[in-house]
Image (tube, rainbow, N blue to C red):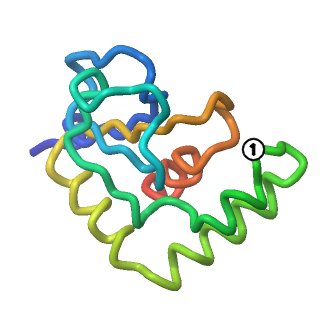
């Protein structure tokens, strides 16, 4: 496989699936409200790569808490590395789209994961 096939994107799970999504991986701990499994077209749900419930509730998508959220989330991922390893393995197999439910497209766990995967 060449590097062009190893594309990782992020996308709100509520947006329509597209052919270039590749494998669609939900990275939220909770299933998105009001969305059926058929409509979401999720290939893999990696709940364990999502922020802990405590961190998610503390953050509440407050942009002022974003820098601290990122720091704490990365620390959580490093403490239990298996979910991140699984995610990295999936990205080696071809195009992947990380799906998230948050309305905020700049401050969510998928943004942090994309940054980690691109390093």
Residue neighbourhood size for the residue with mark 1, other residues' Cα within 10 Å, grouped as few (<14), some (14–19), many (≥20): some
| Location of residue 70 (image quadrant) | bottom right
| Location of residue 67 (image quadrant) | bottom right
Residue farthest toward the right in the current orientation of the protein: 64
Q: Which residue is mark 1?
A: 61
Does 104 sit left or right of 116 as displayed?
right
Residue farthest toward the bottom in the current orientation of the protein: 79
**Residue drawn at the location 31% of the way across and 27% of the way down:** 36
In terms of depth relative to the viewer, which is nearer, 103 or 105? 103
Does 79 sit left or right of 82 as displayed?
right
So how many labels did they put on this image?
1
In terms of depth relative to the viewer, which is nearer, 33 or 96? 33
- The image shows residue 103 at horizontal and vertical percentages of 64, 28
**Badge 1 element:** loop
The quarter in which the N terminus is drawn is top left
- The image shows residue 112 at horizontal and vertical percentages of 58, 53
Residue farthest toward the front in the current orientation of the protein: 34
- The image shows residue 5 at horizontal and vertical percentages of 19, 36
69 is higher (above) or lower (below) than 64: below
**Residue drawn at the location 48% of the way across and 38% of the way down:** 100
**Residue drawn at the location 60% of the way across and 64% of the way down:** 53
Residue farthest toward the left in the current orientation of the protein: 1
- The image shows residue 118 at horizontal and vertical percentages of 46, 52
35 is higher (above) or lower (below) than 46: above
């Amino acid at each position: 496989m060449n590097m062009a096939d190893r594309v990782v994107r992020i996308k709100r799970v509520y947006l329509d699936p597209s052919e270039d999504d590749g494998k669609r991986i939900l990275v939220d701990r909770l299933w998105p409200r009001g969305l059926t499994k058929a409509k979401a077209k999720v290939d893999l749900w990696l709940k364990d790569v999502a922020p802990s419930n405590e961190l998610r509730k503390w953050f509440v998508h407050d942009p002022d808490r974003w820098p601290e959220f990122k720091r704490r989330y990365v620390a959580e991922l490093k403490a239990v590395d298996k979910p991140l390893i699984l995610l990295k393995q999936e990205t080696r197999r071809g195009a992947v789209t990380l799906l998230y439910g948050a309305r905020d497209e700049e401050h969510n766990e998928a943004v942090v994961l994309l940054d980690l995967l691109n390093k």
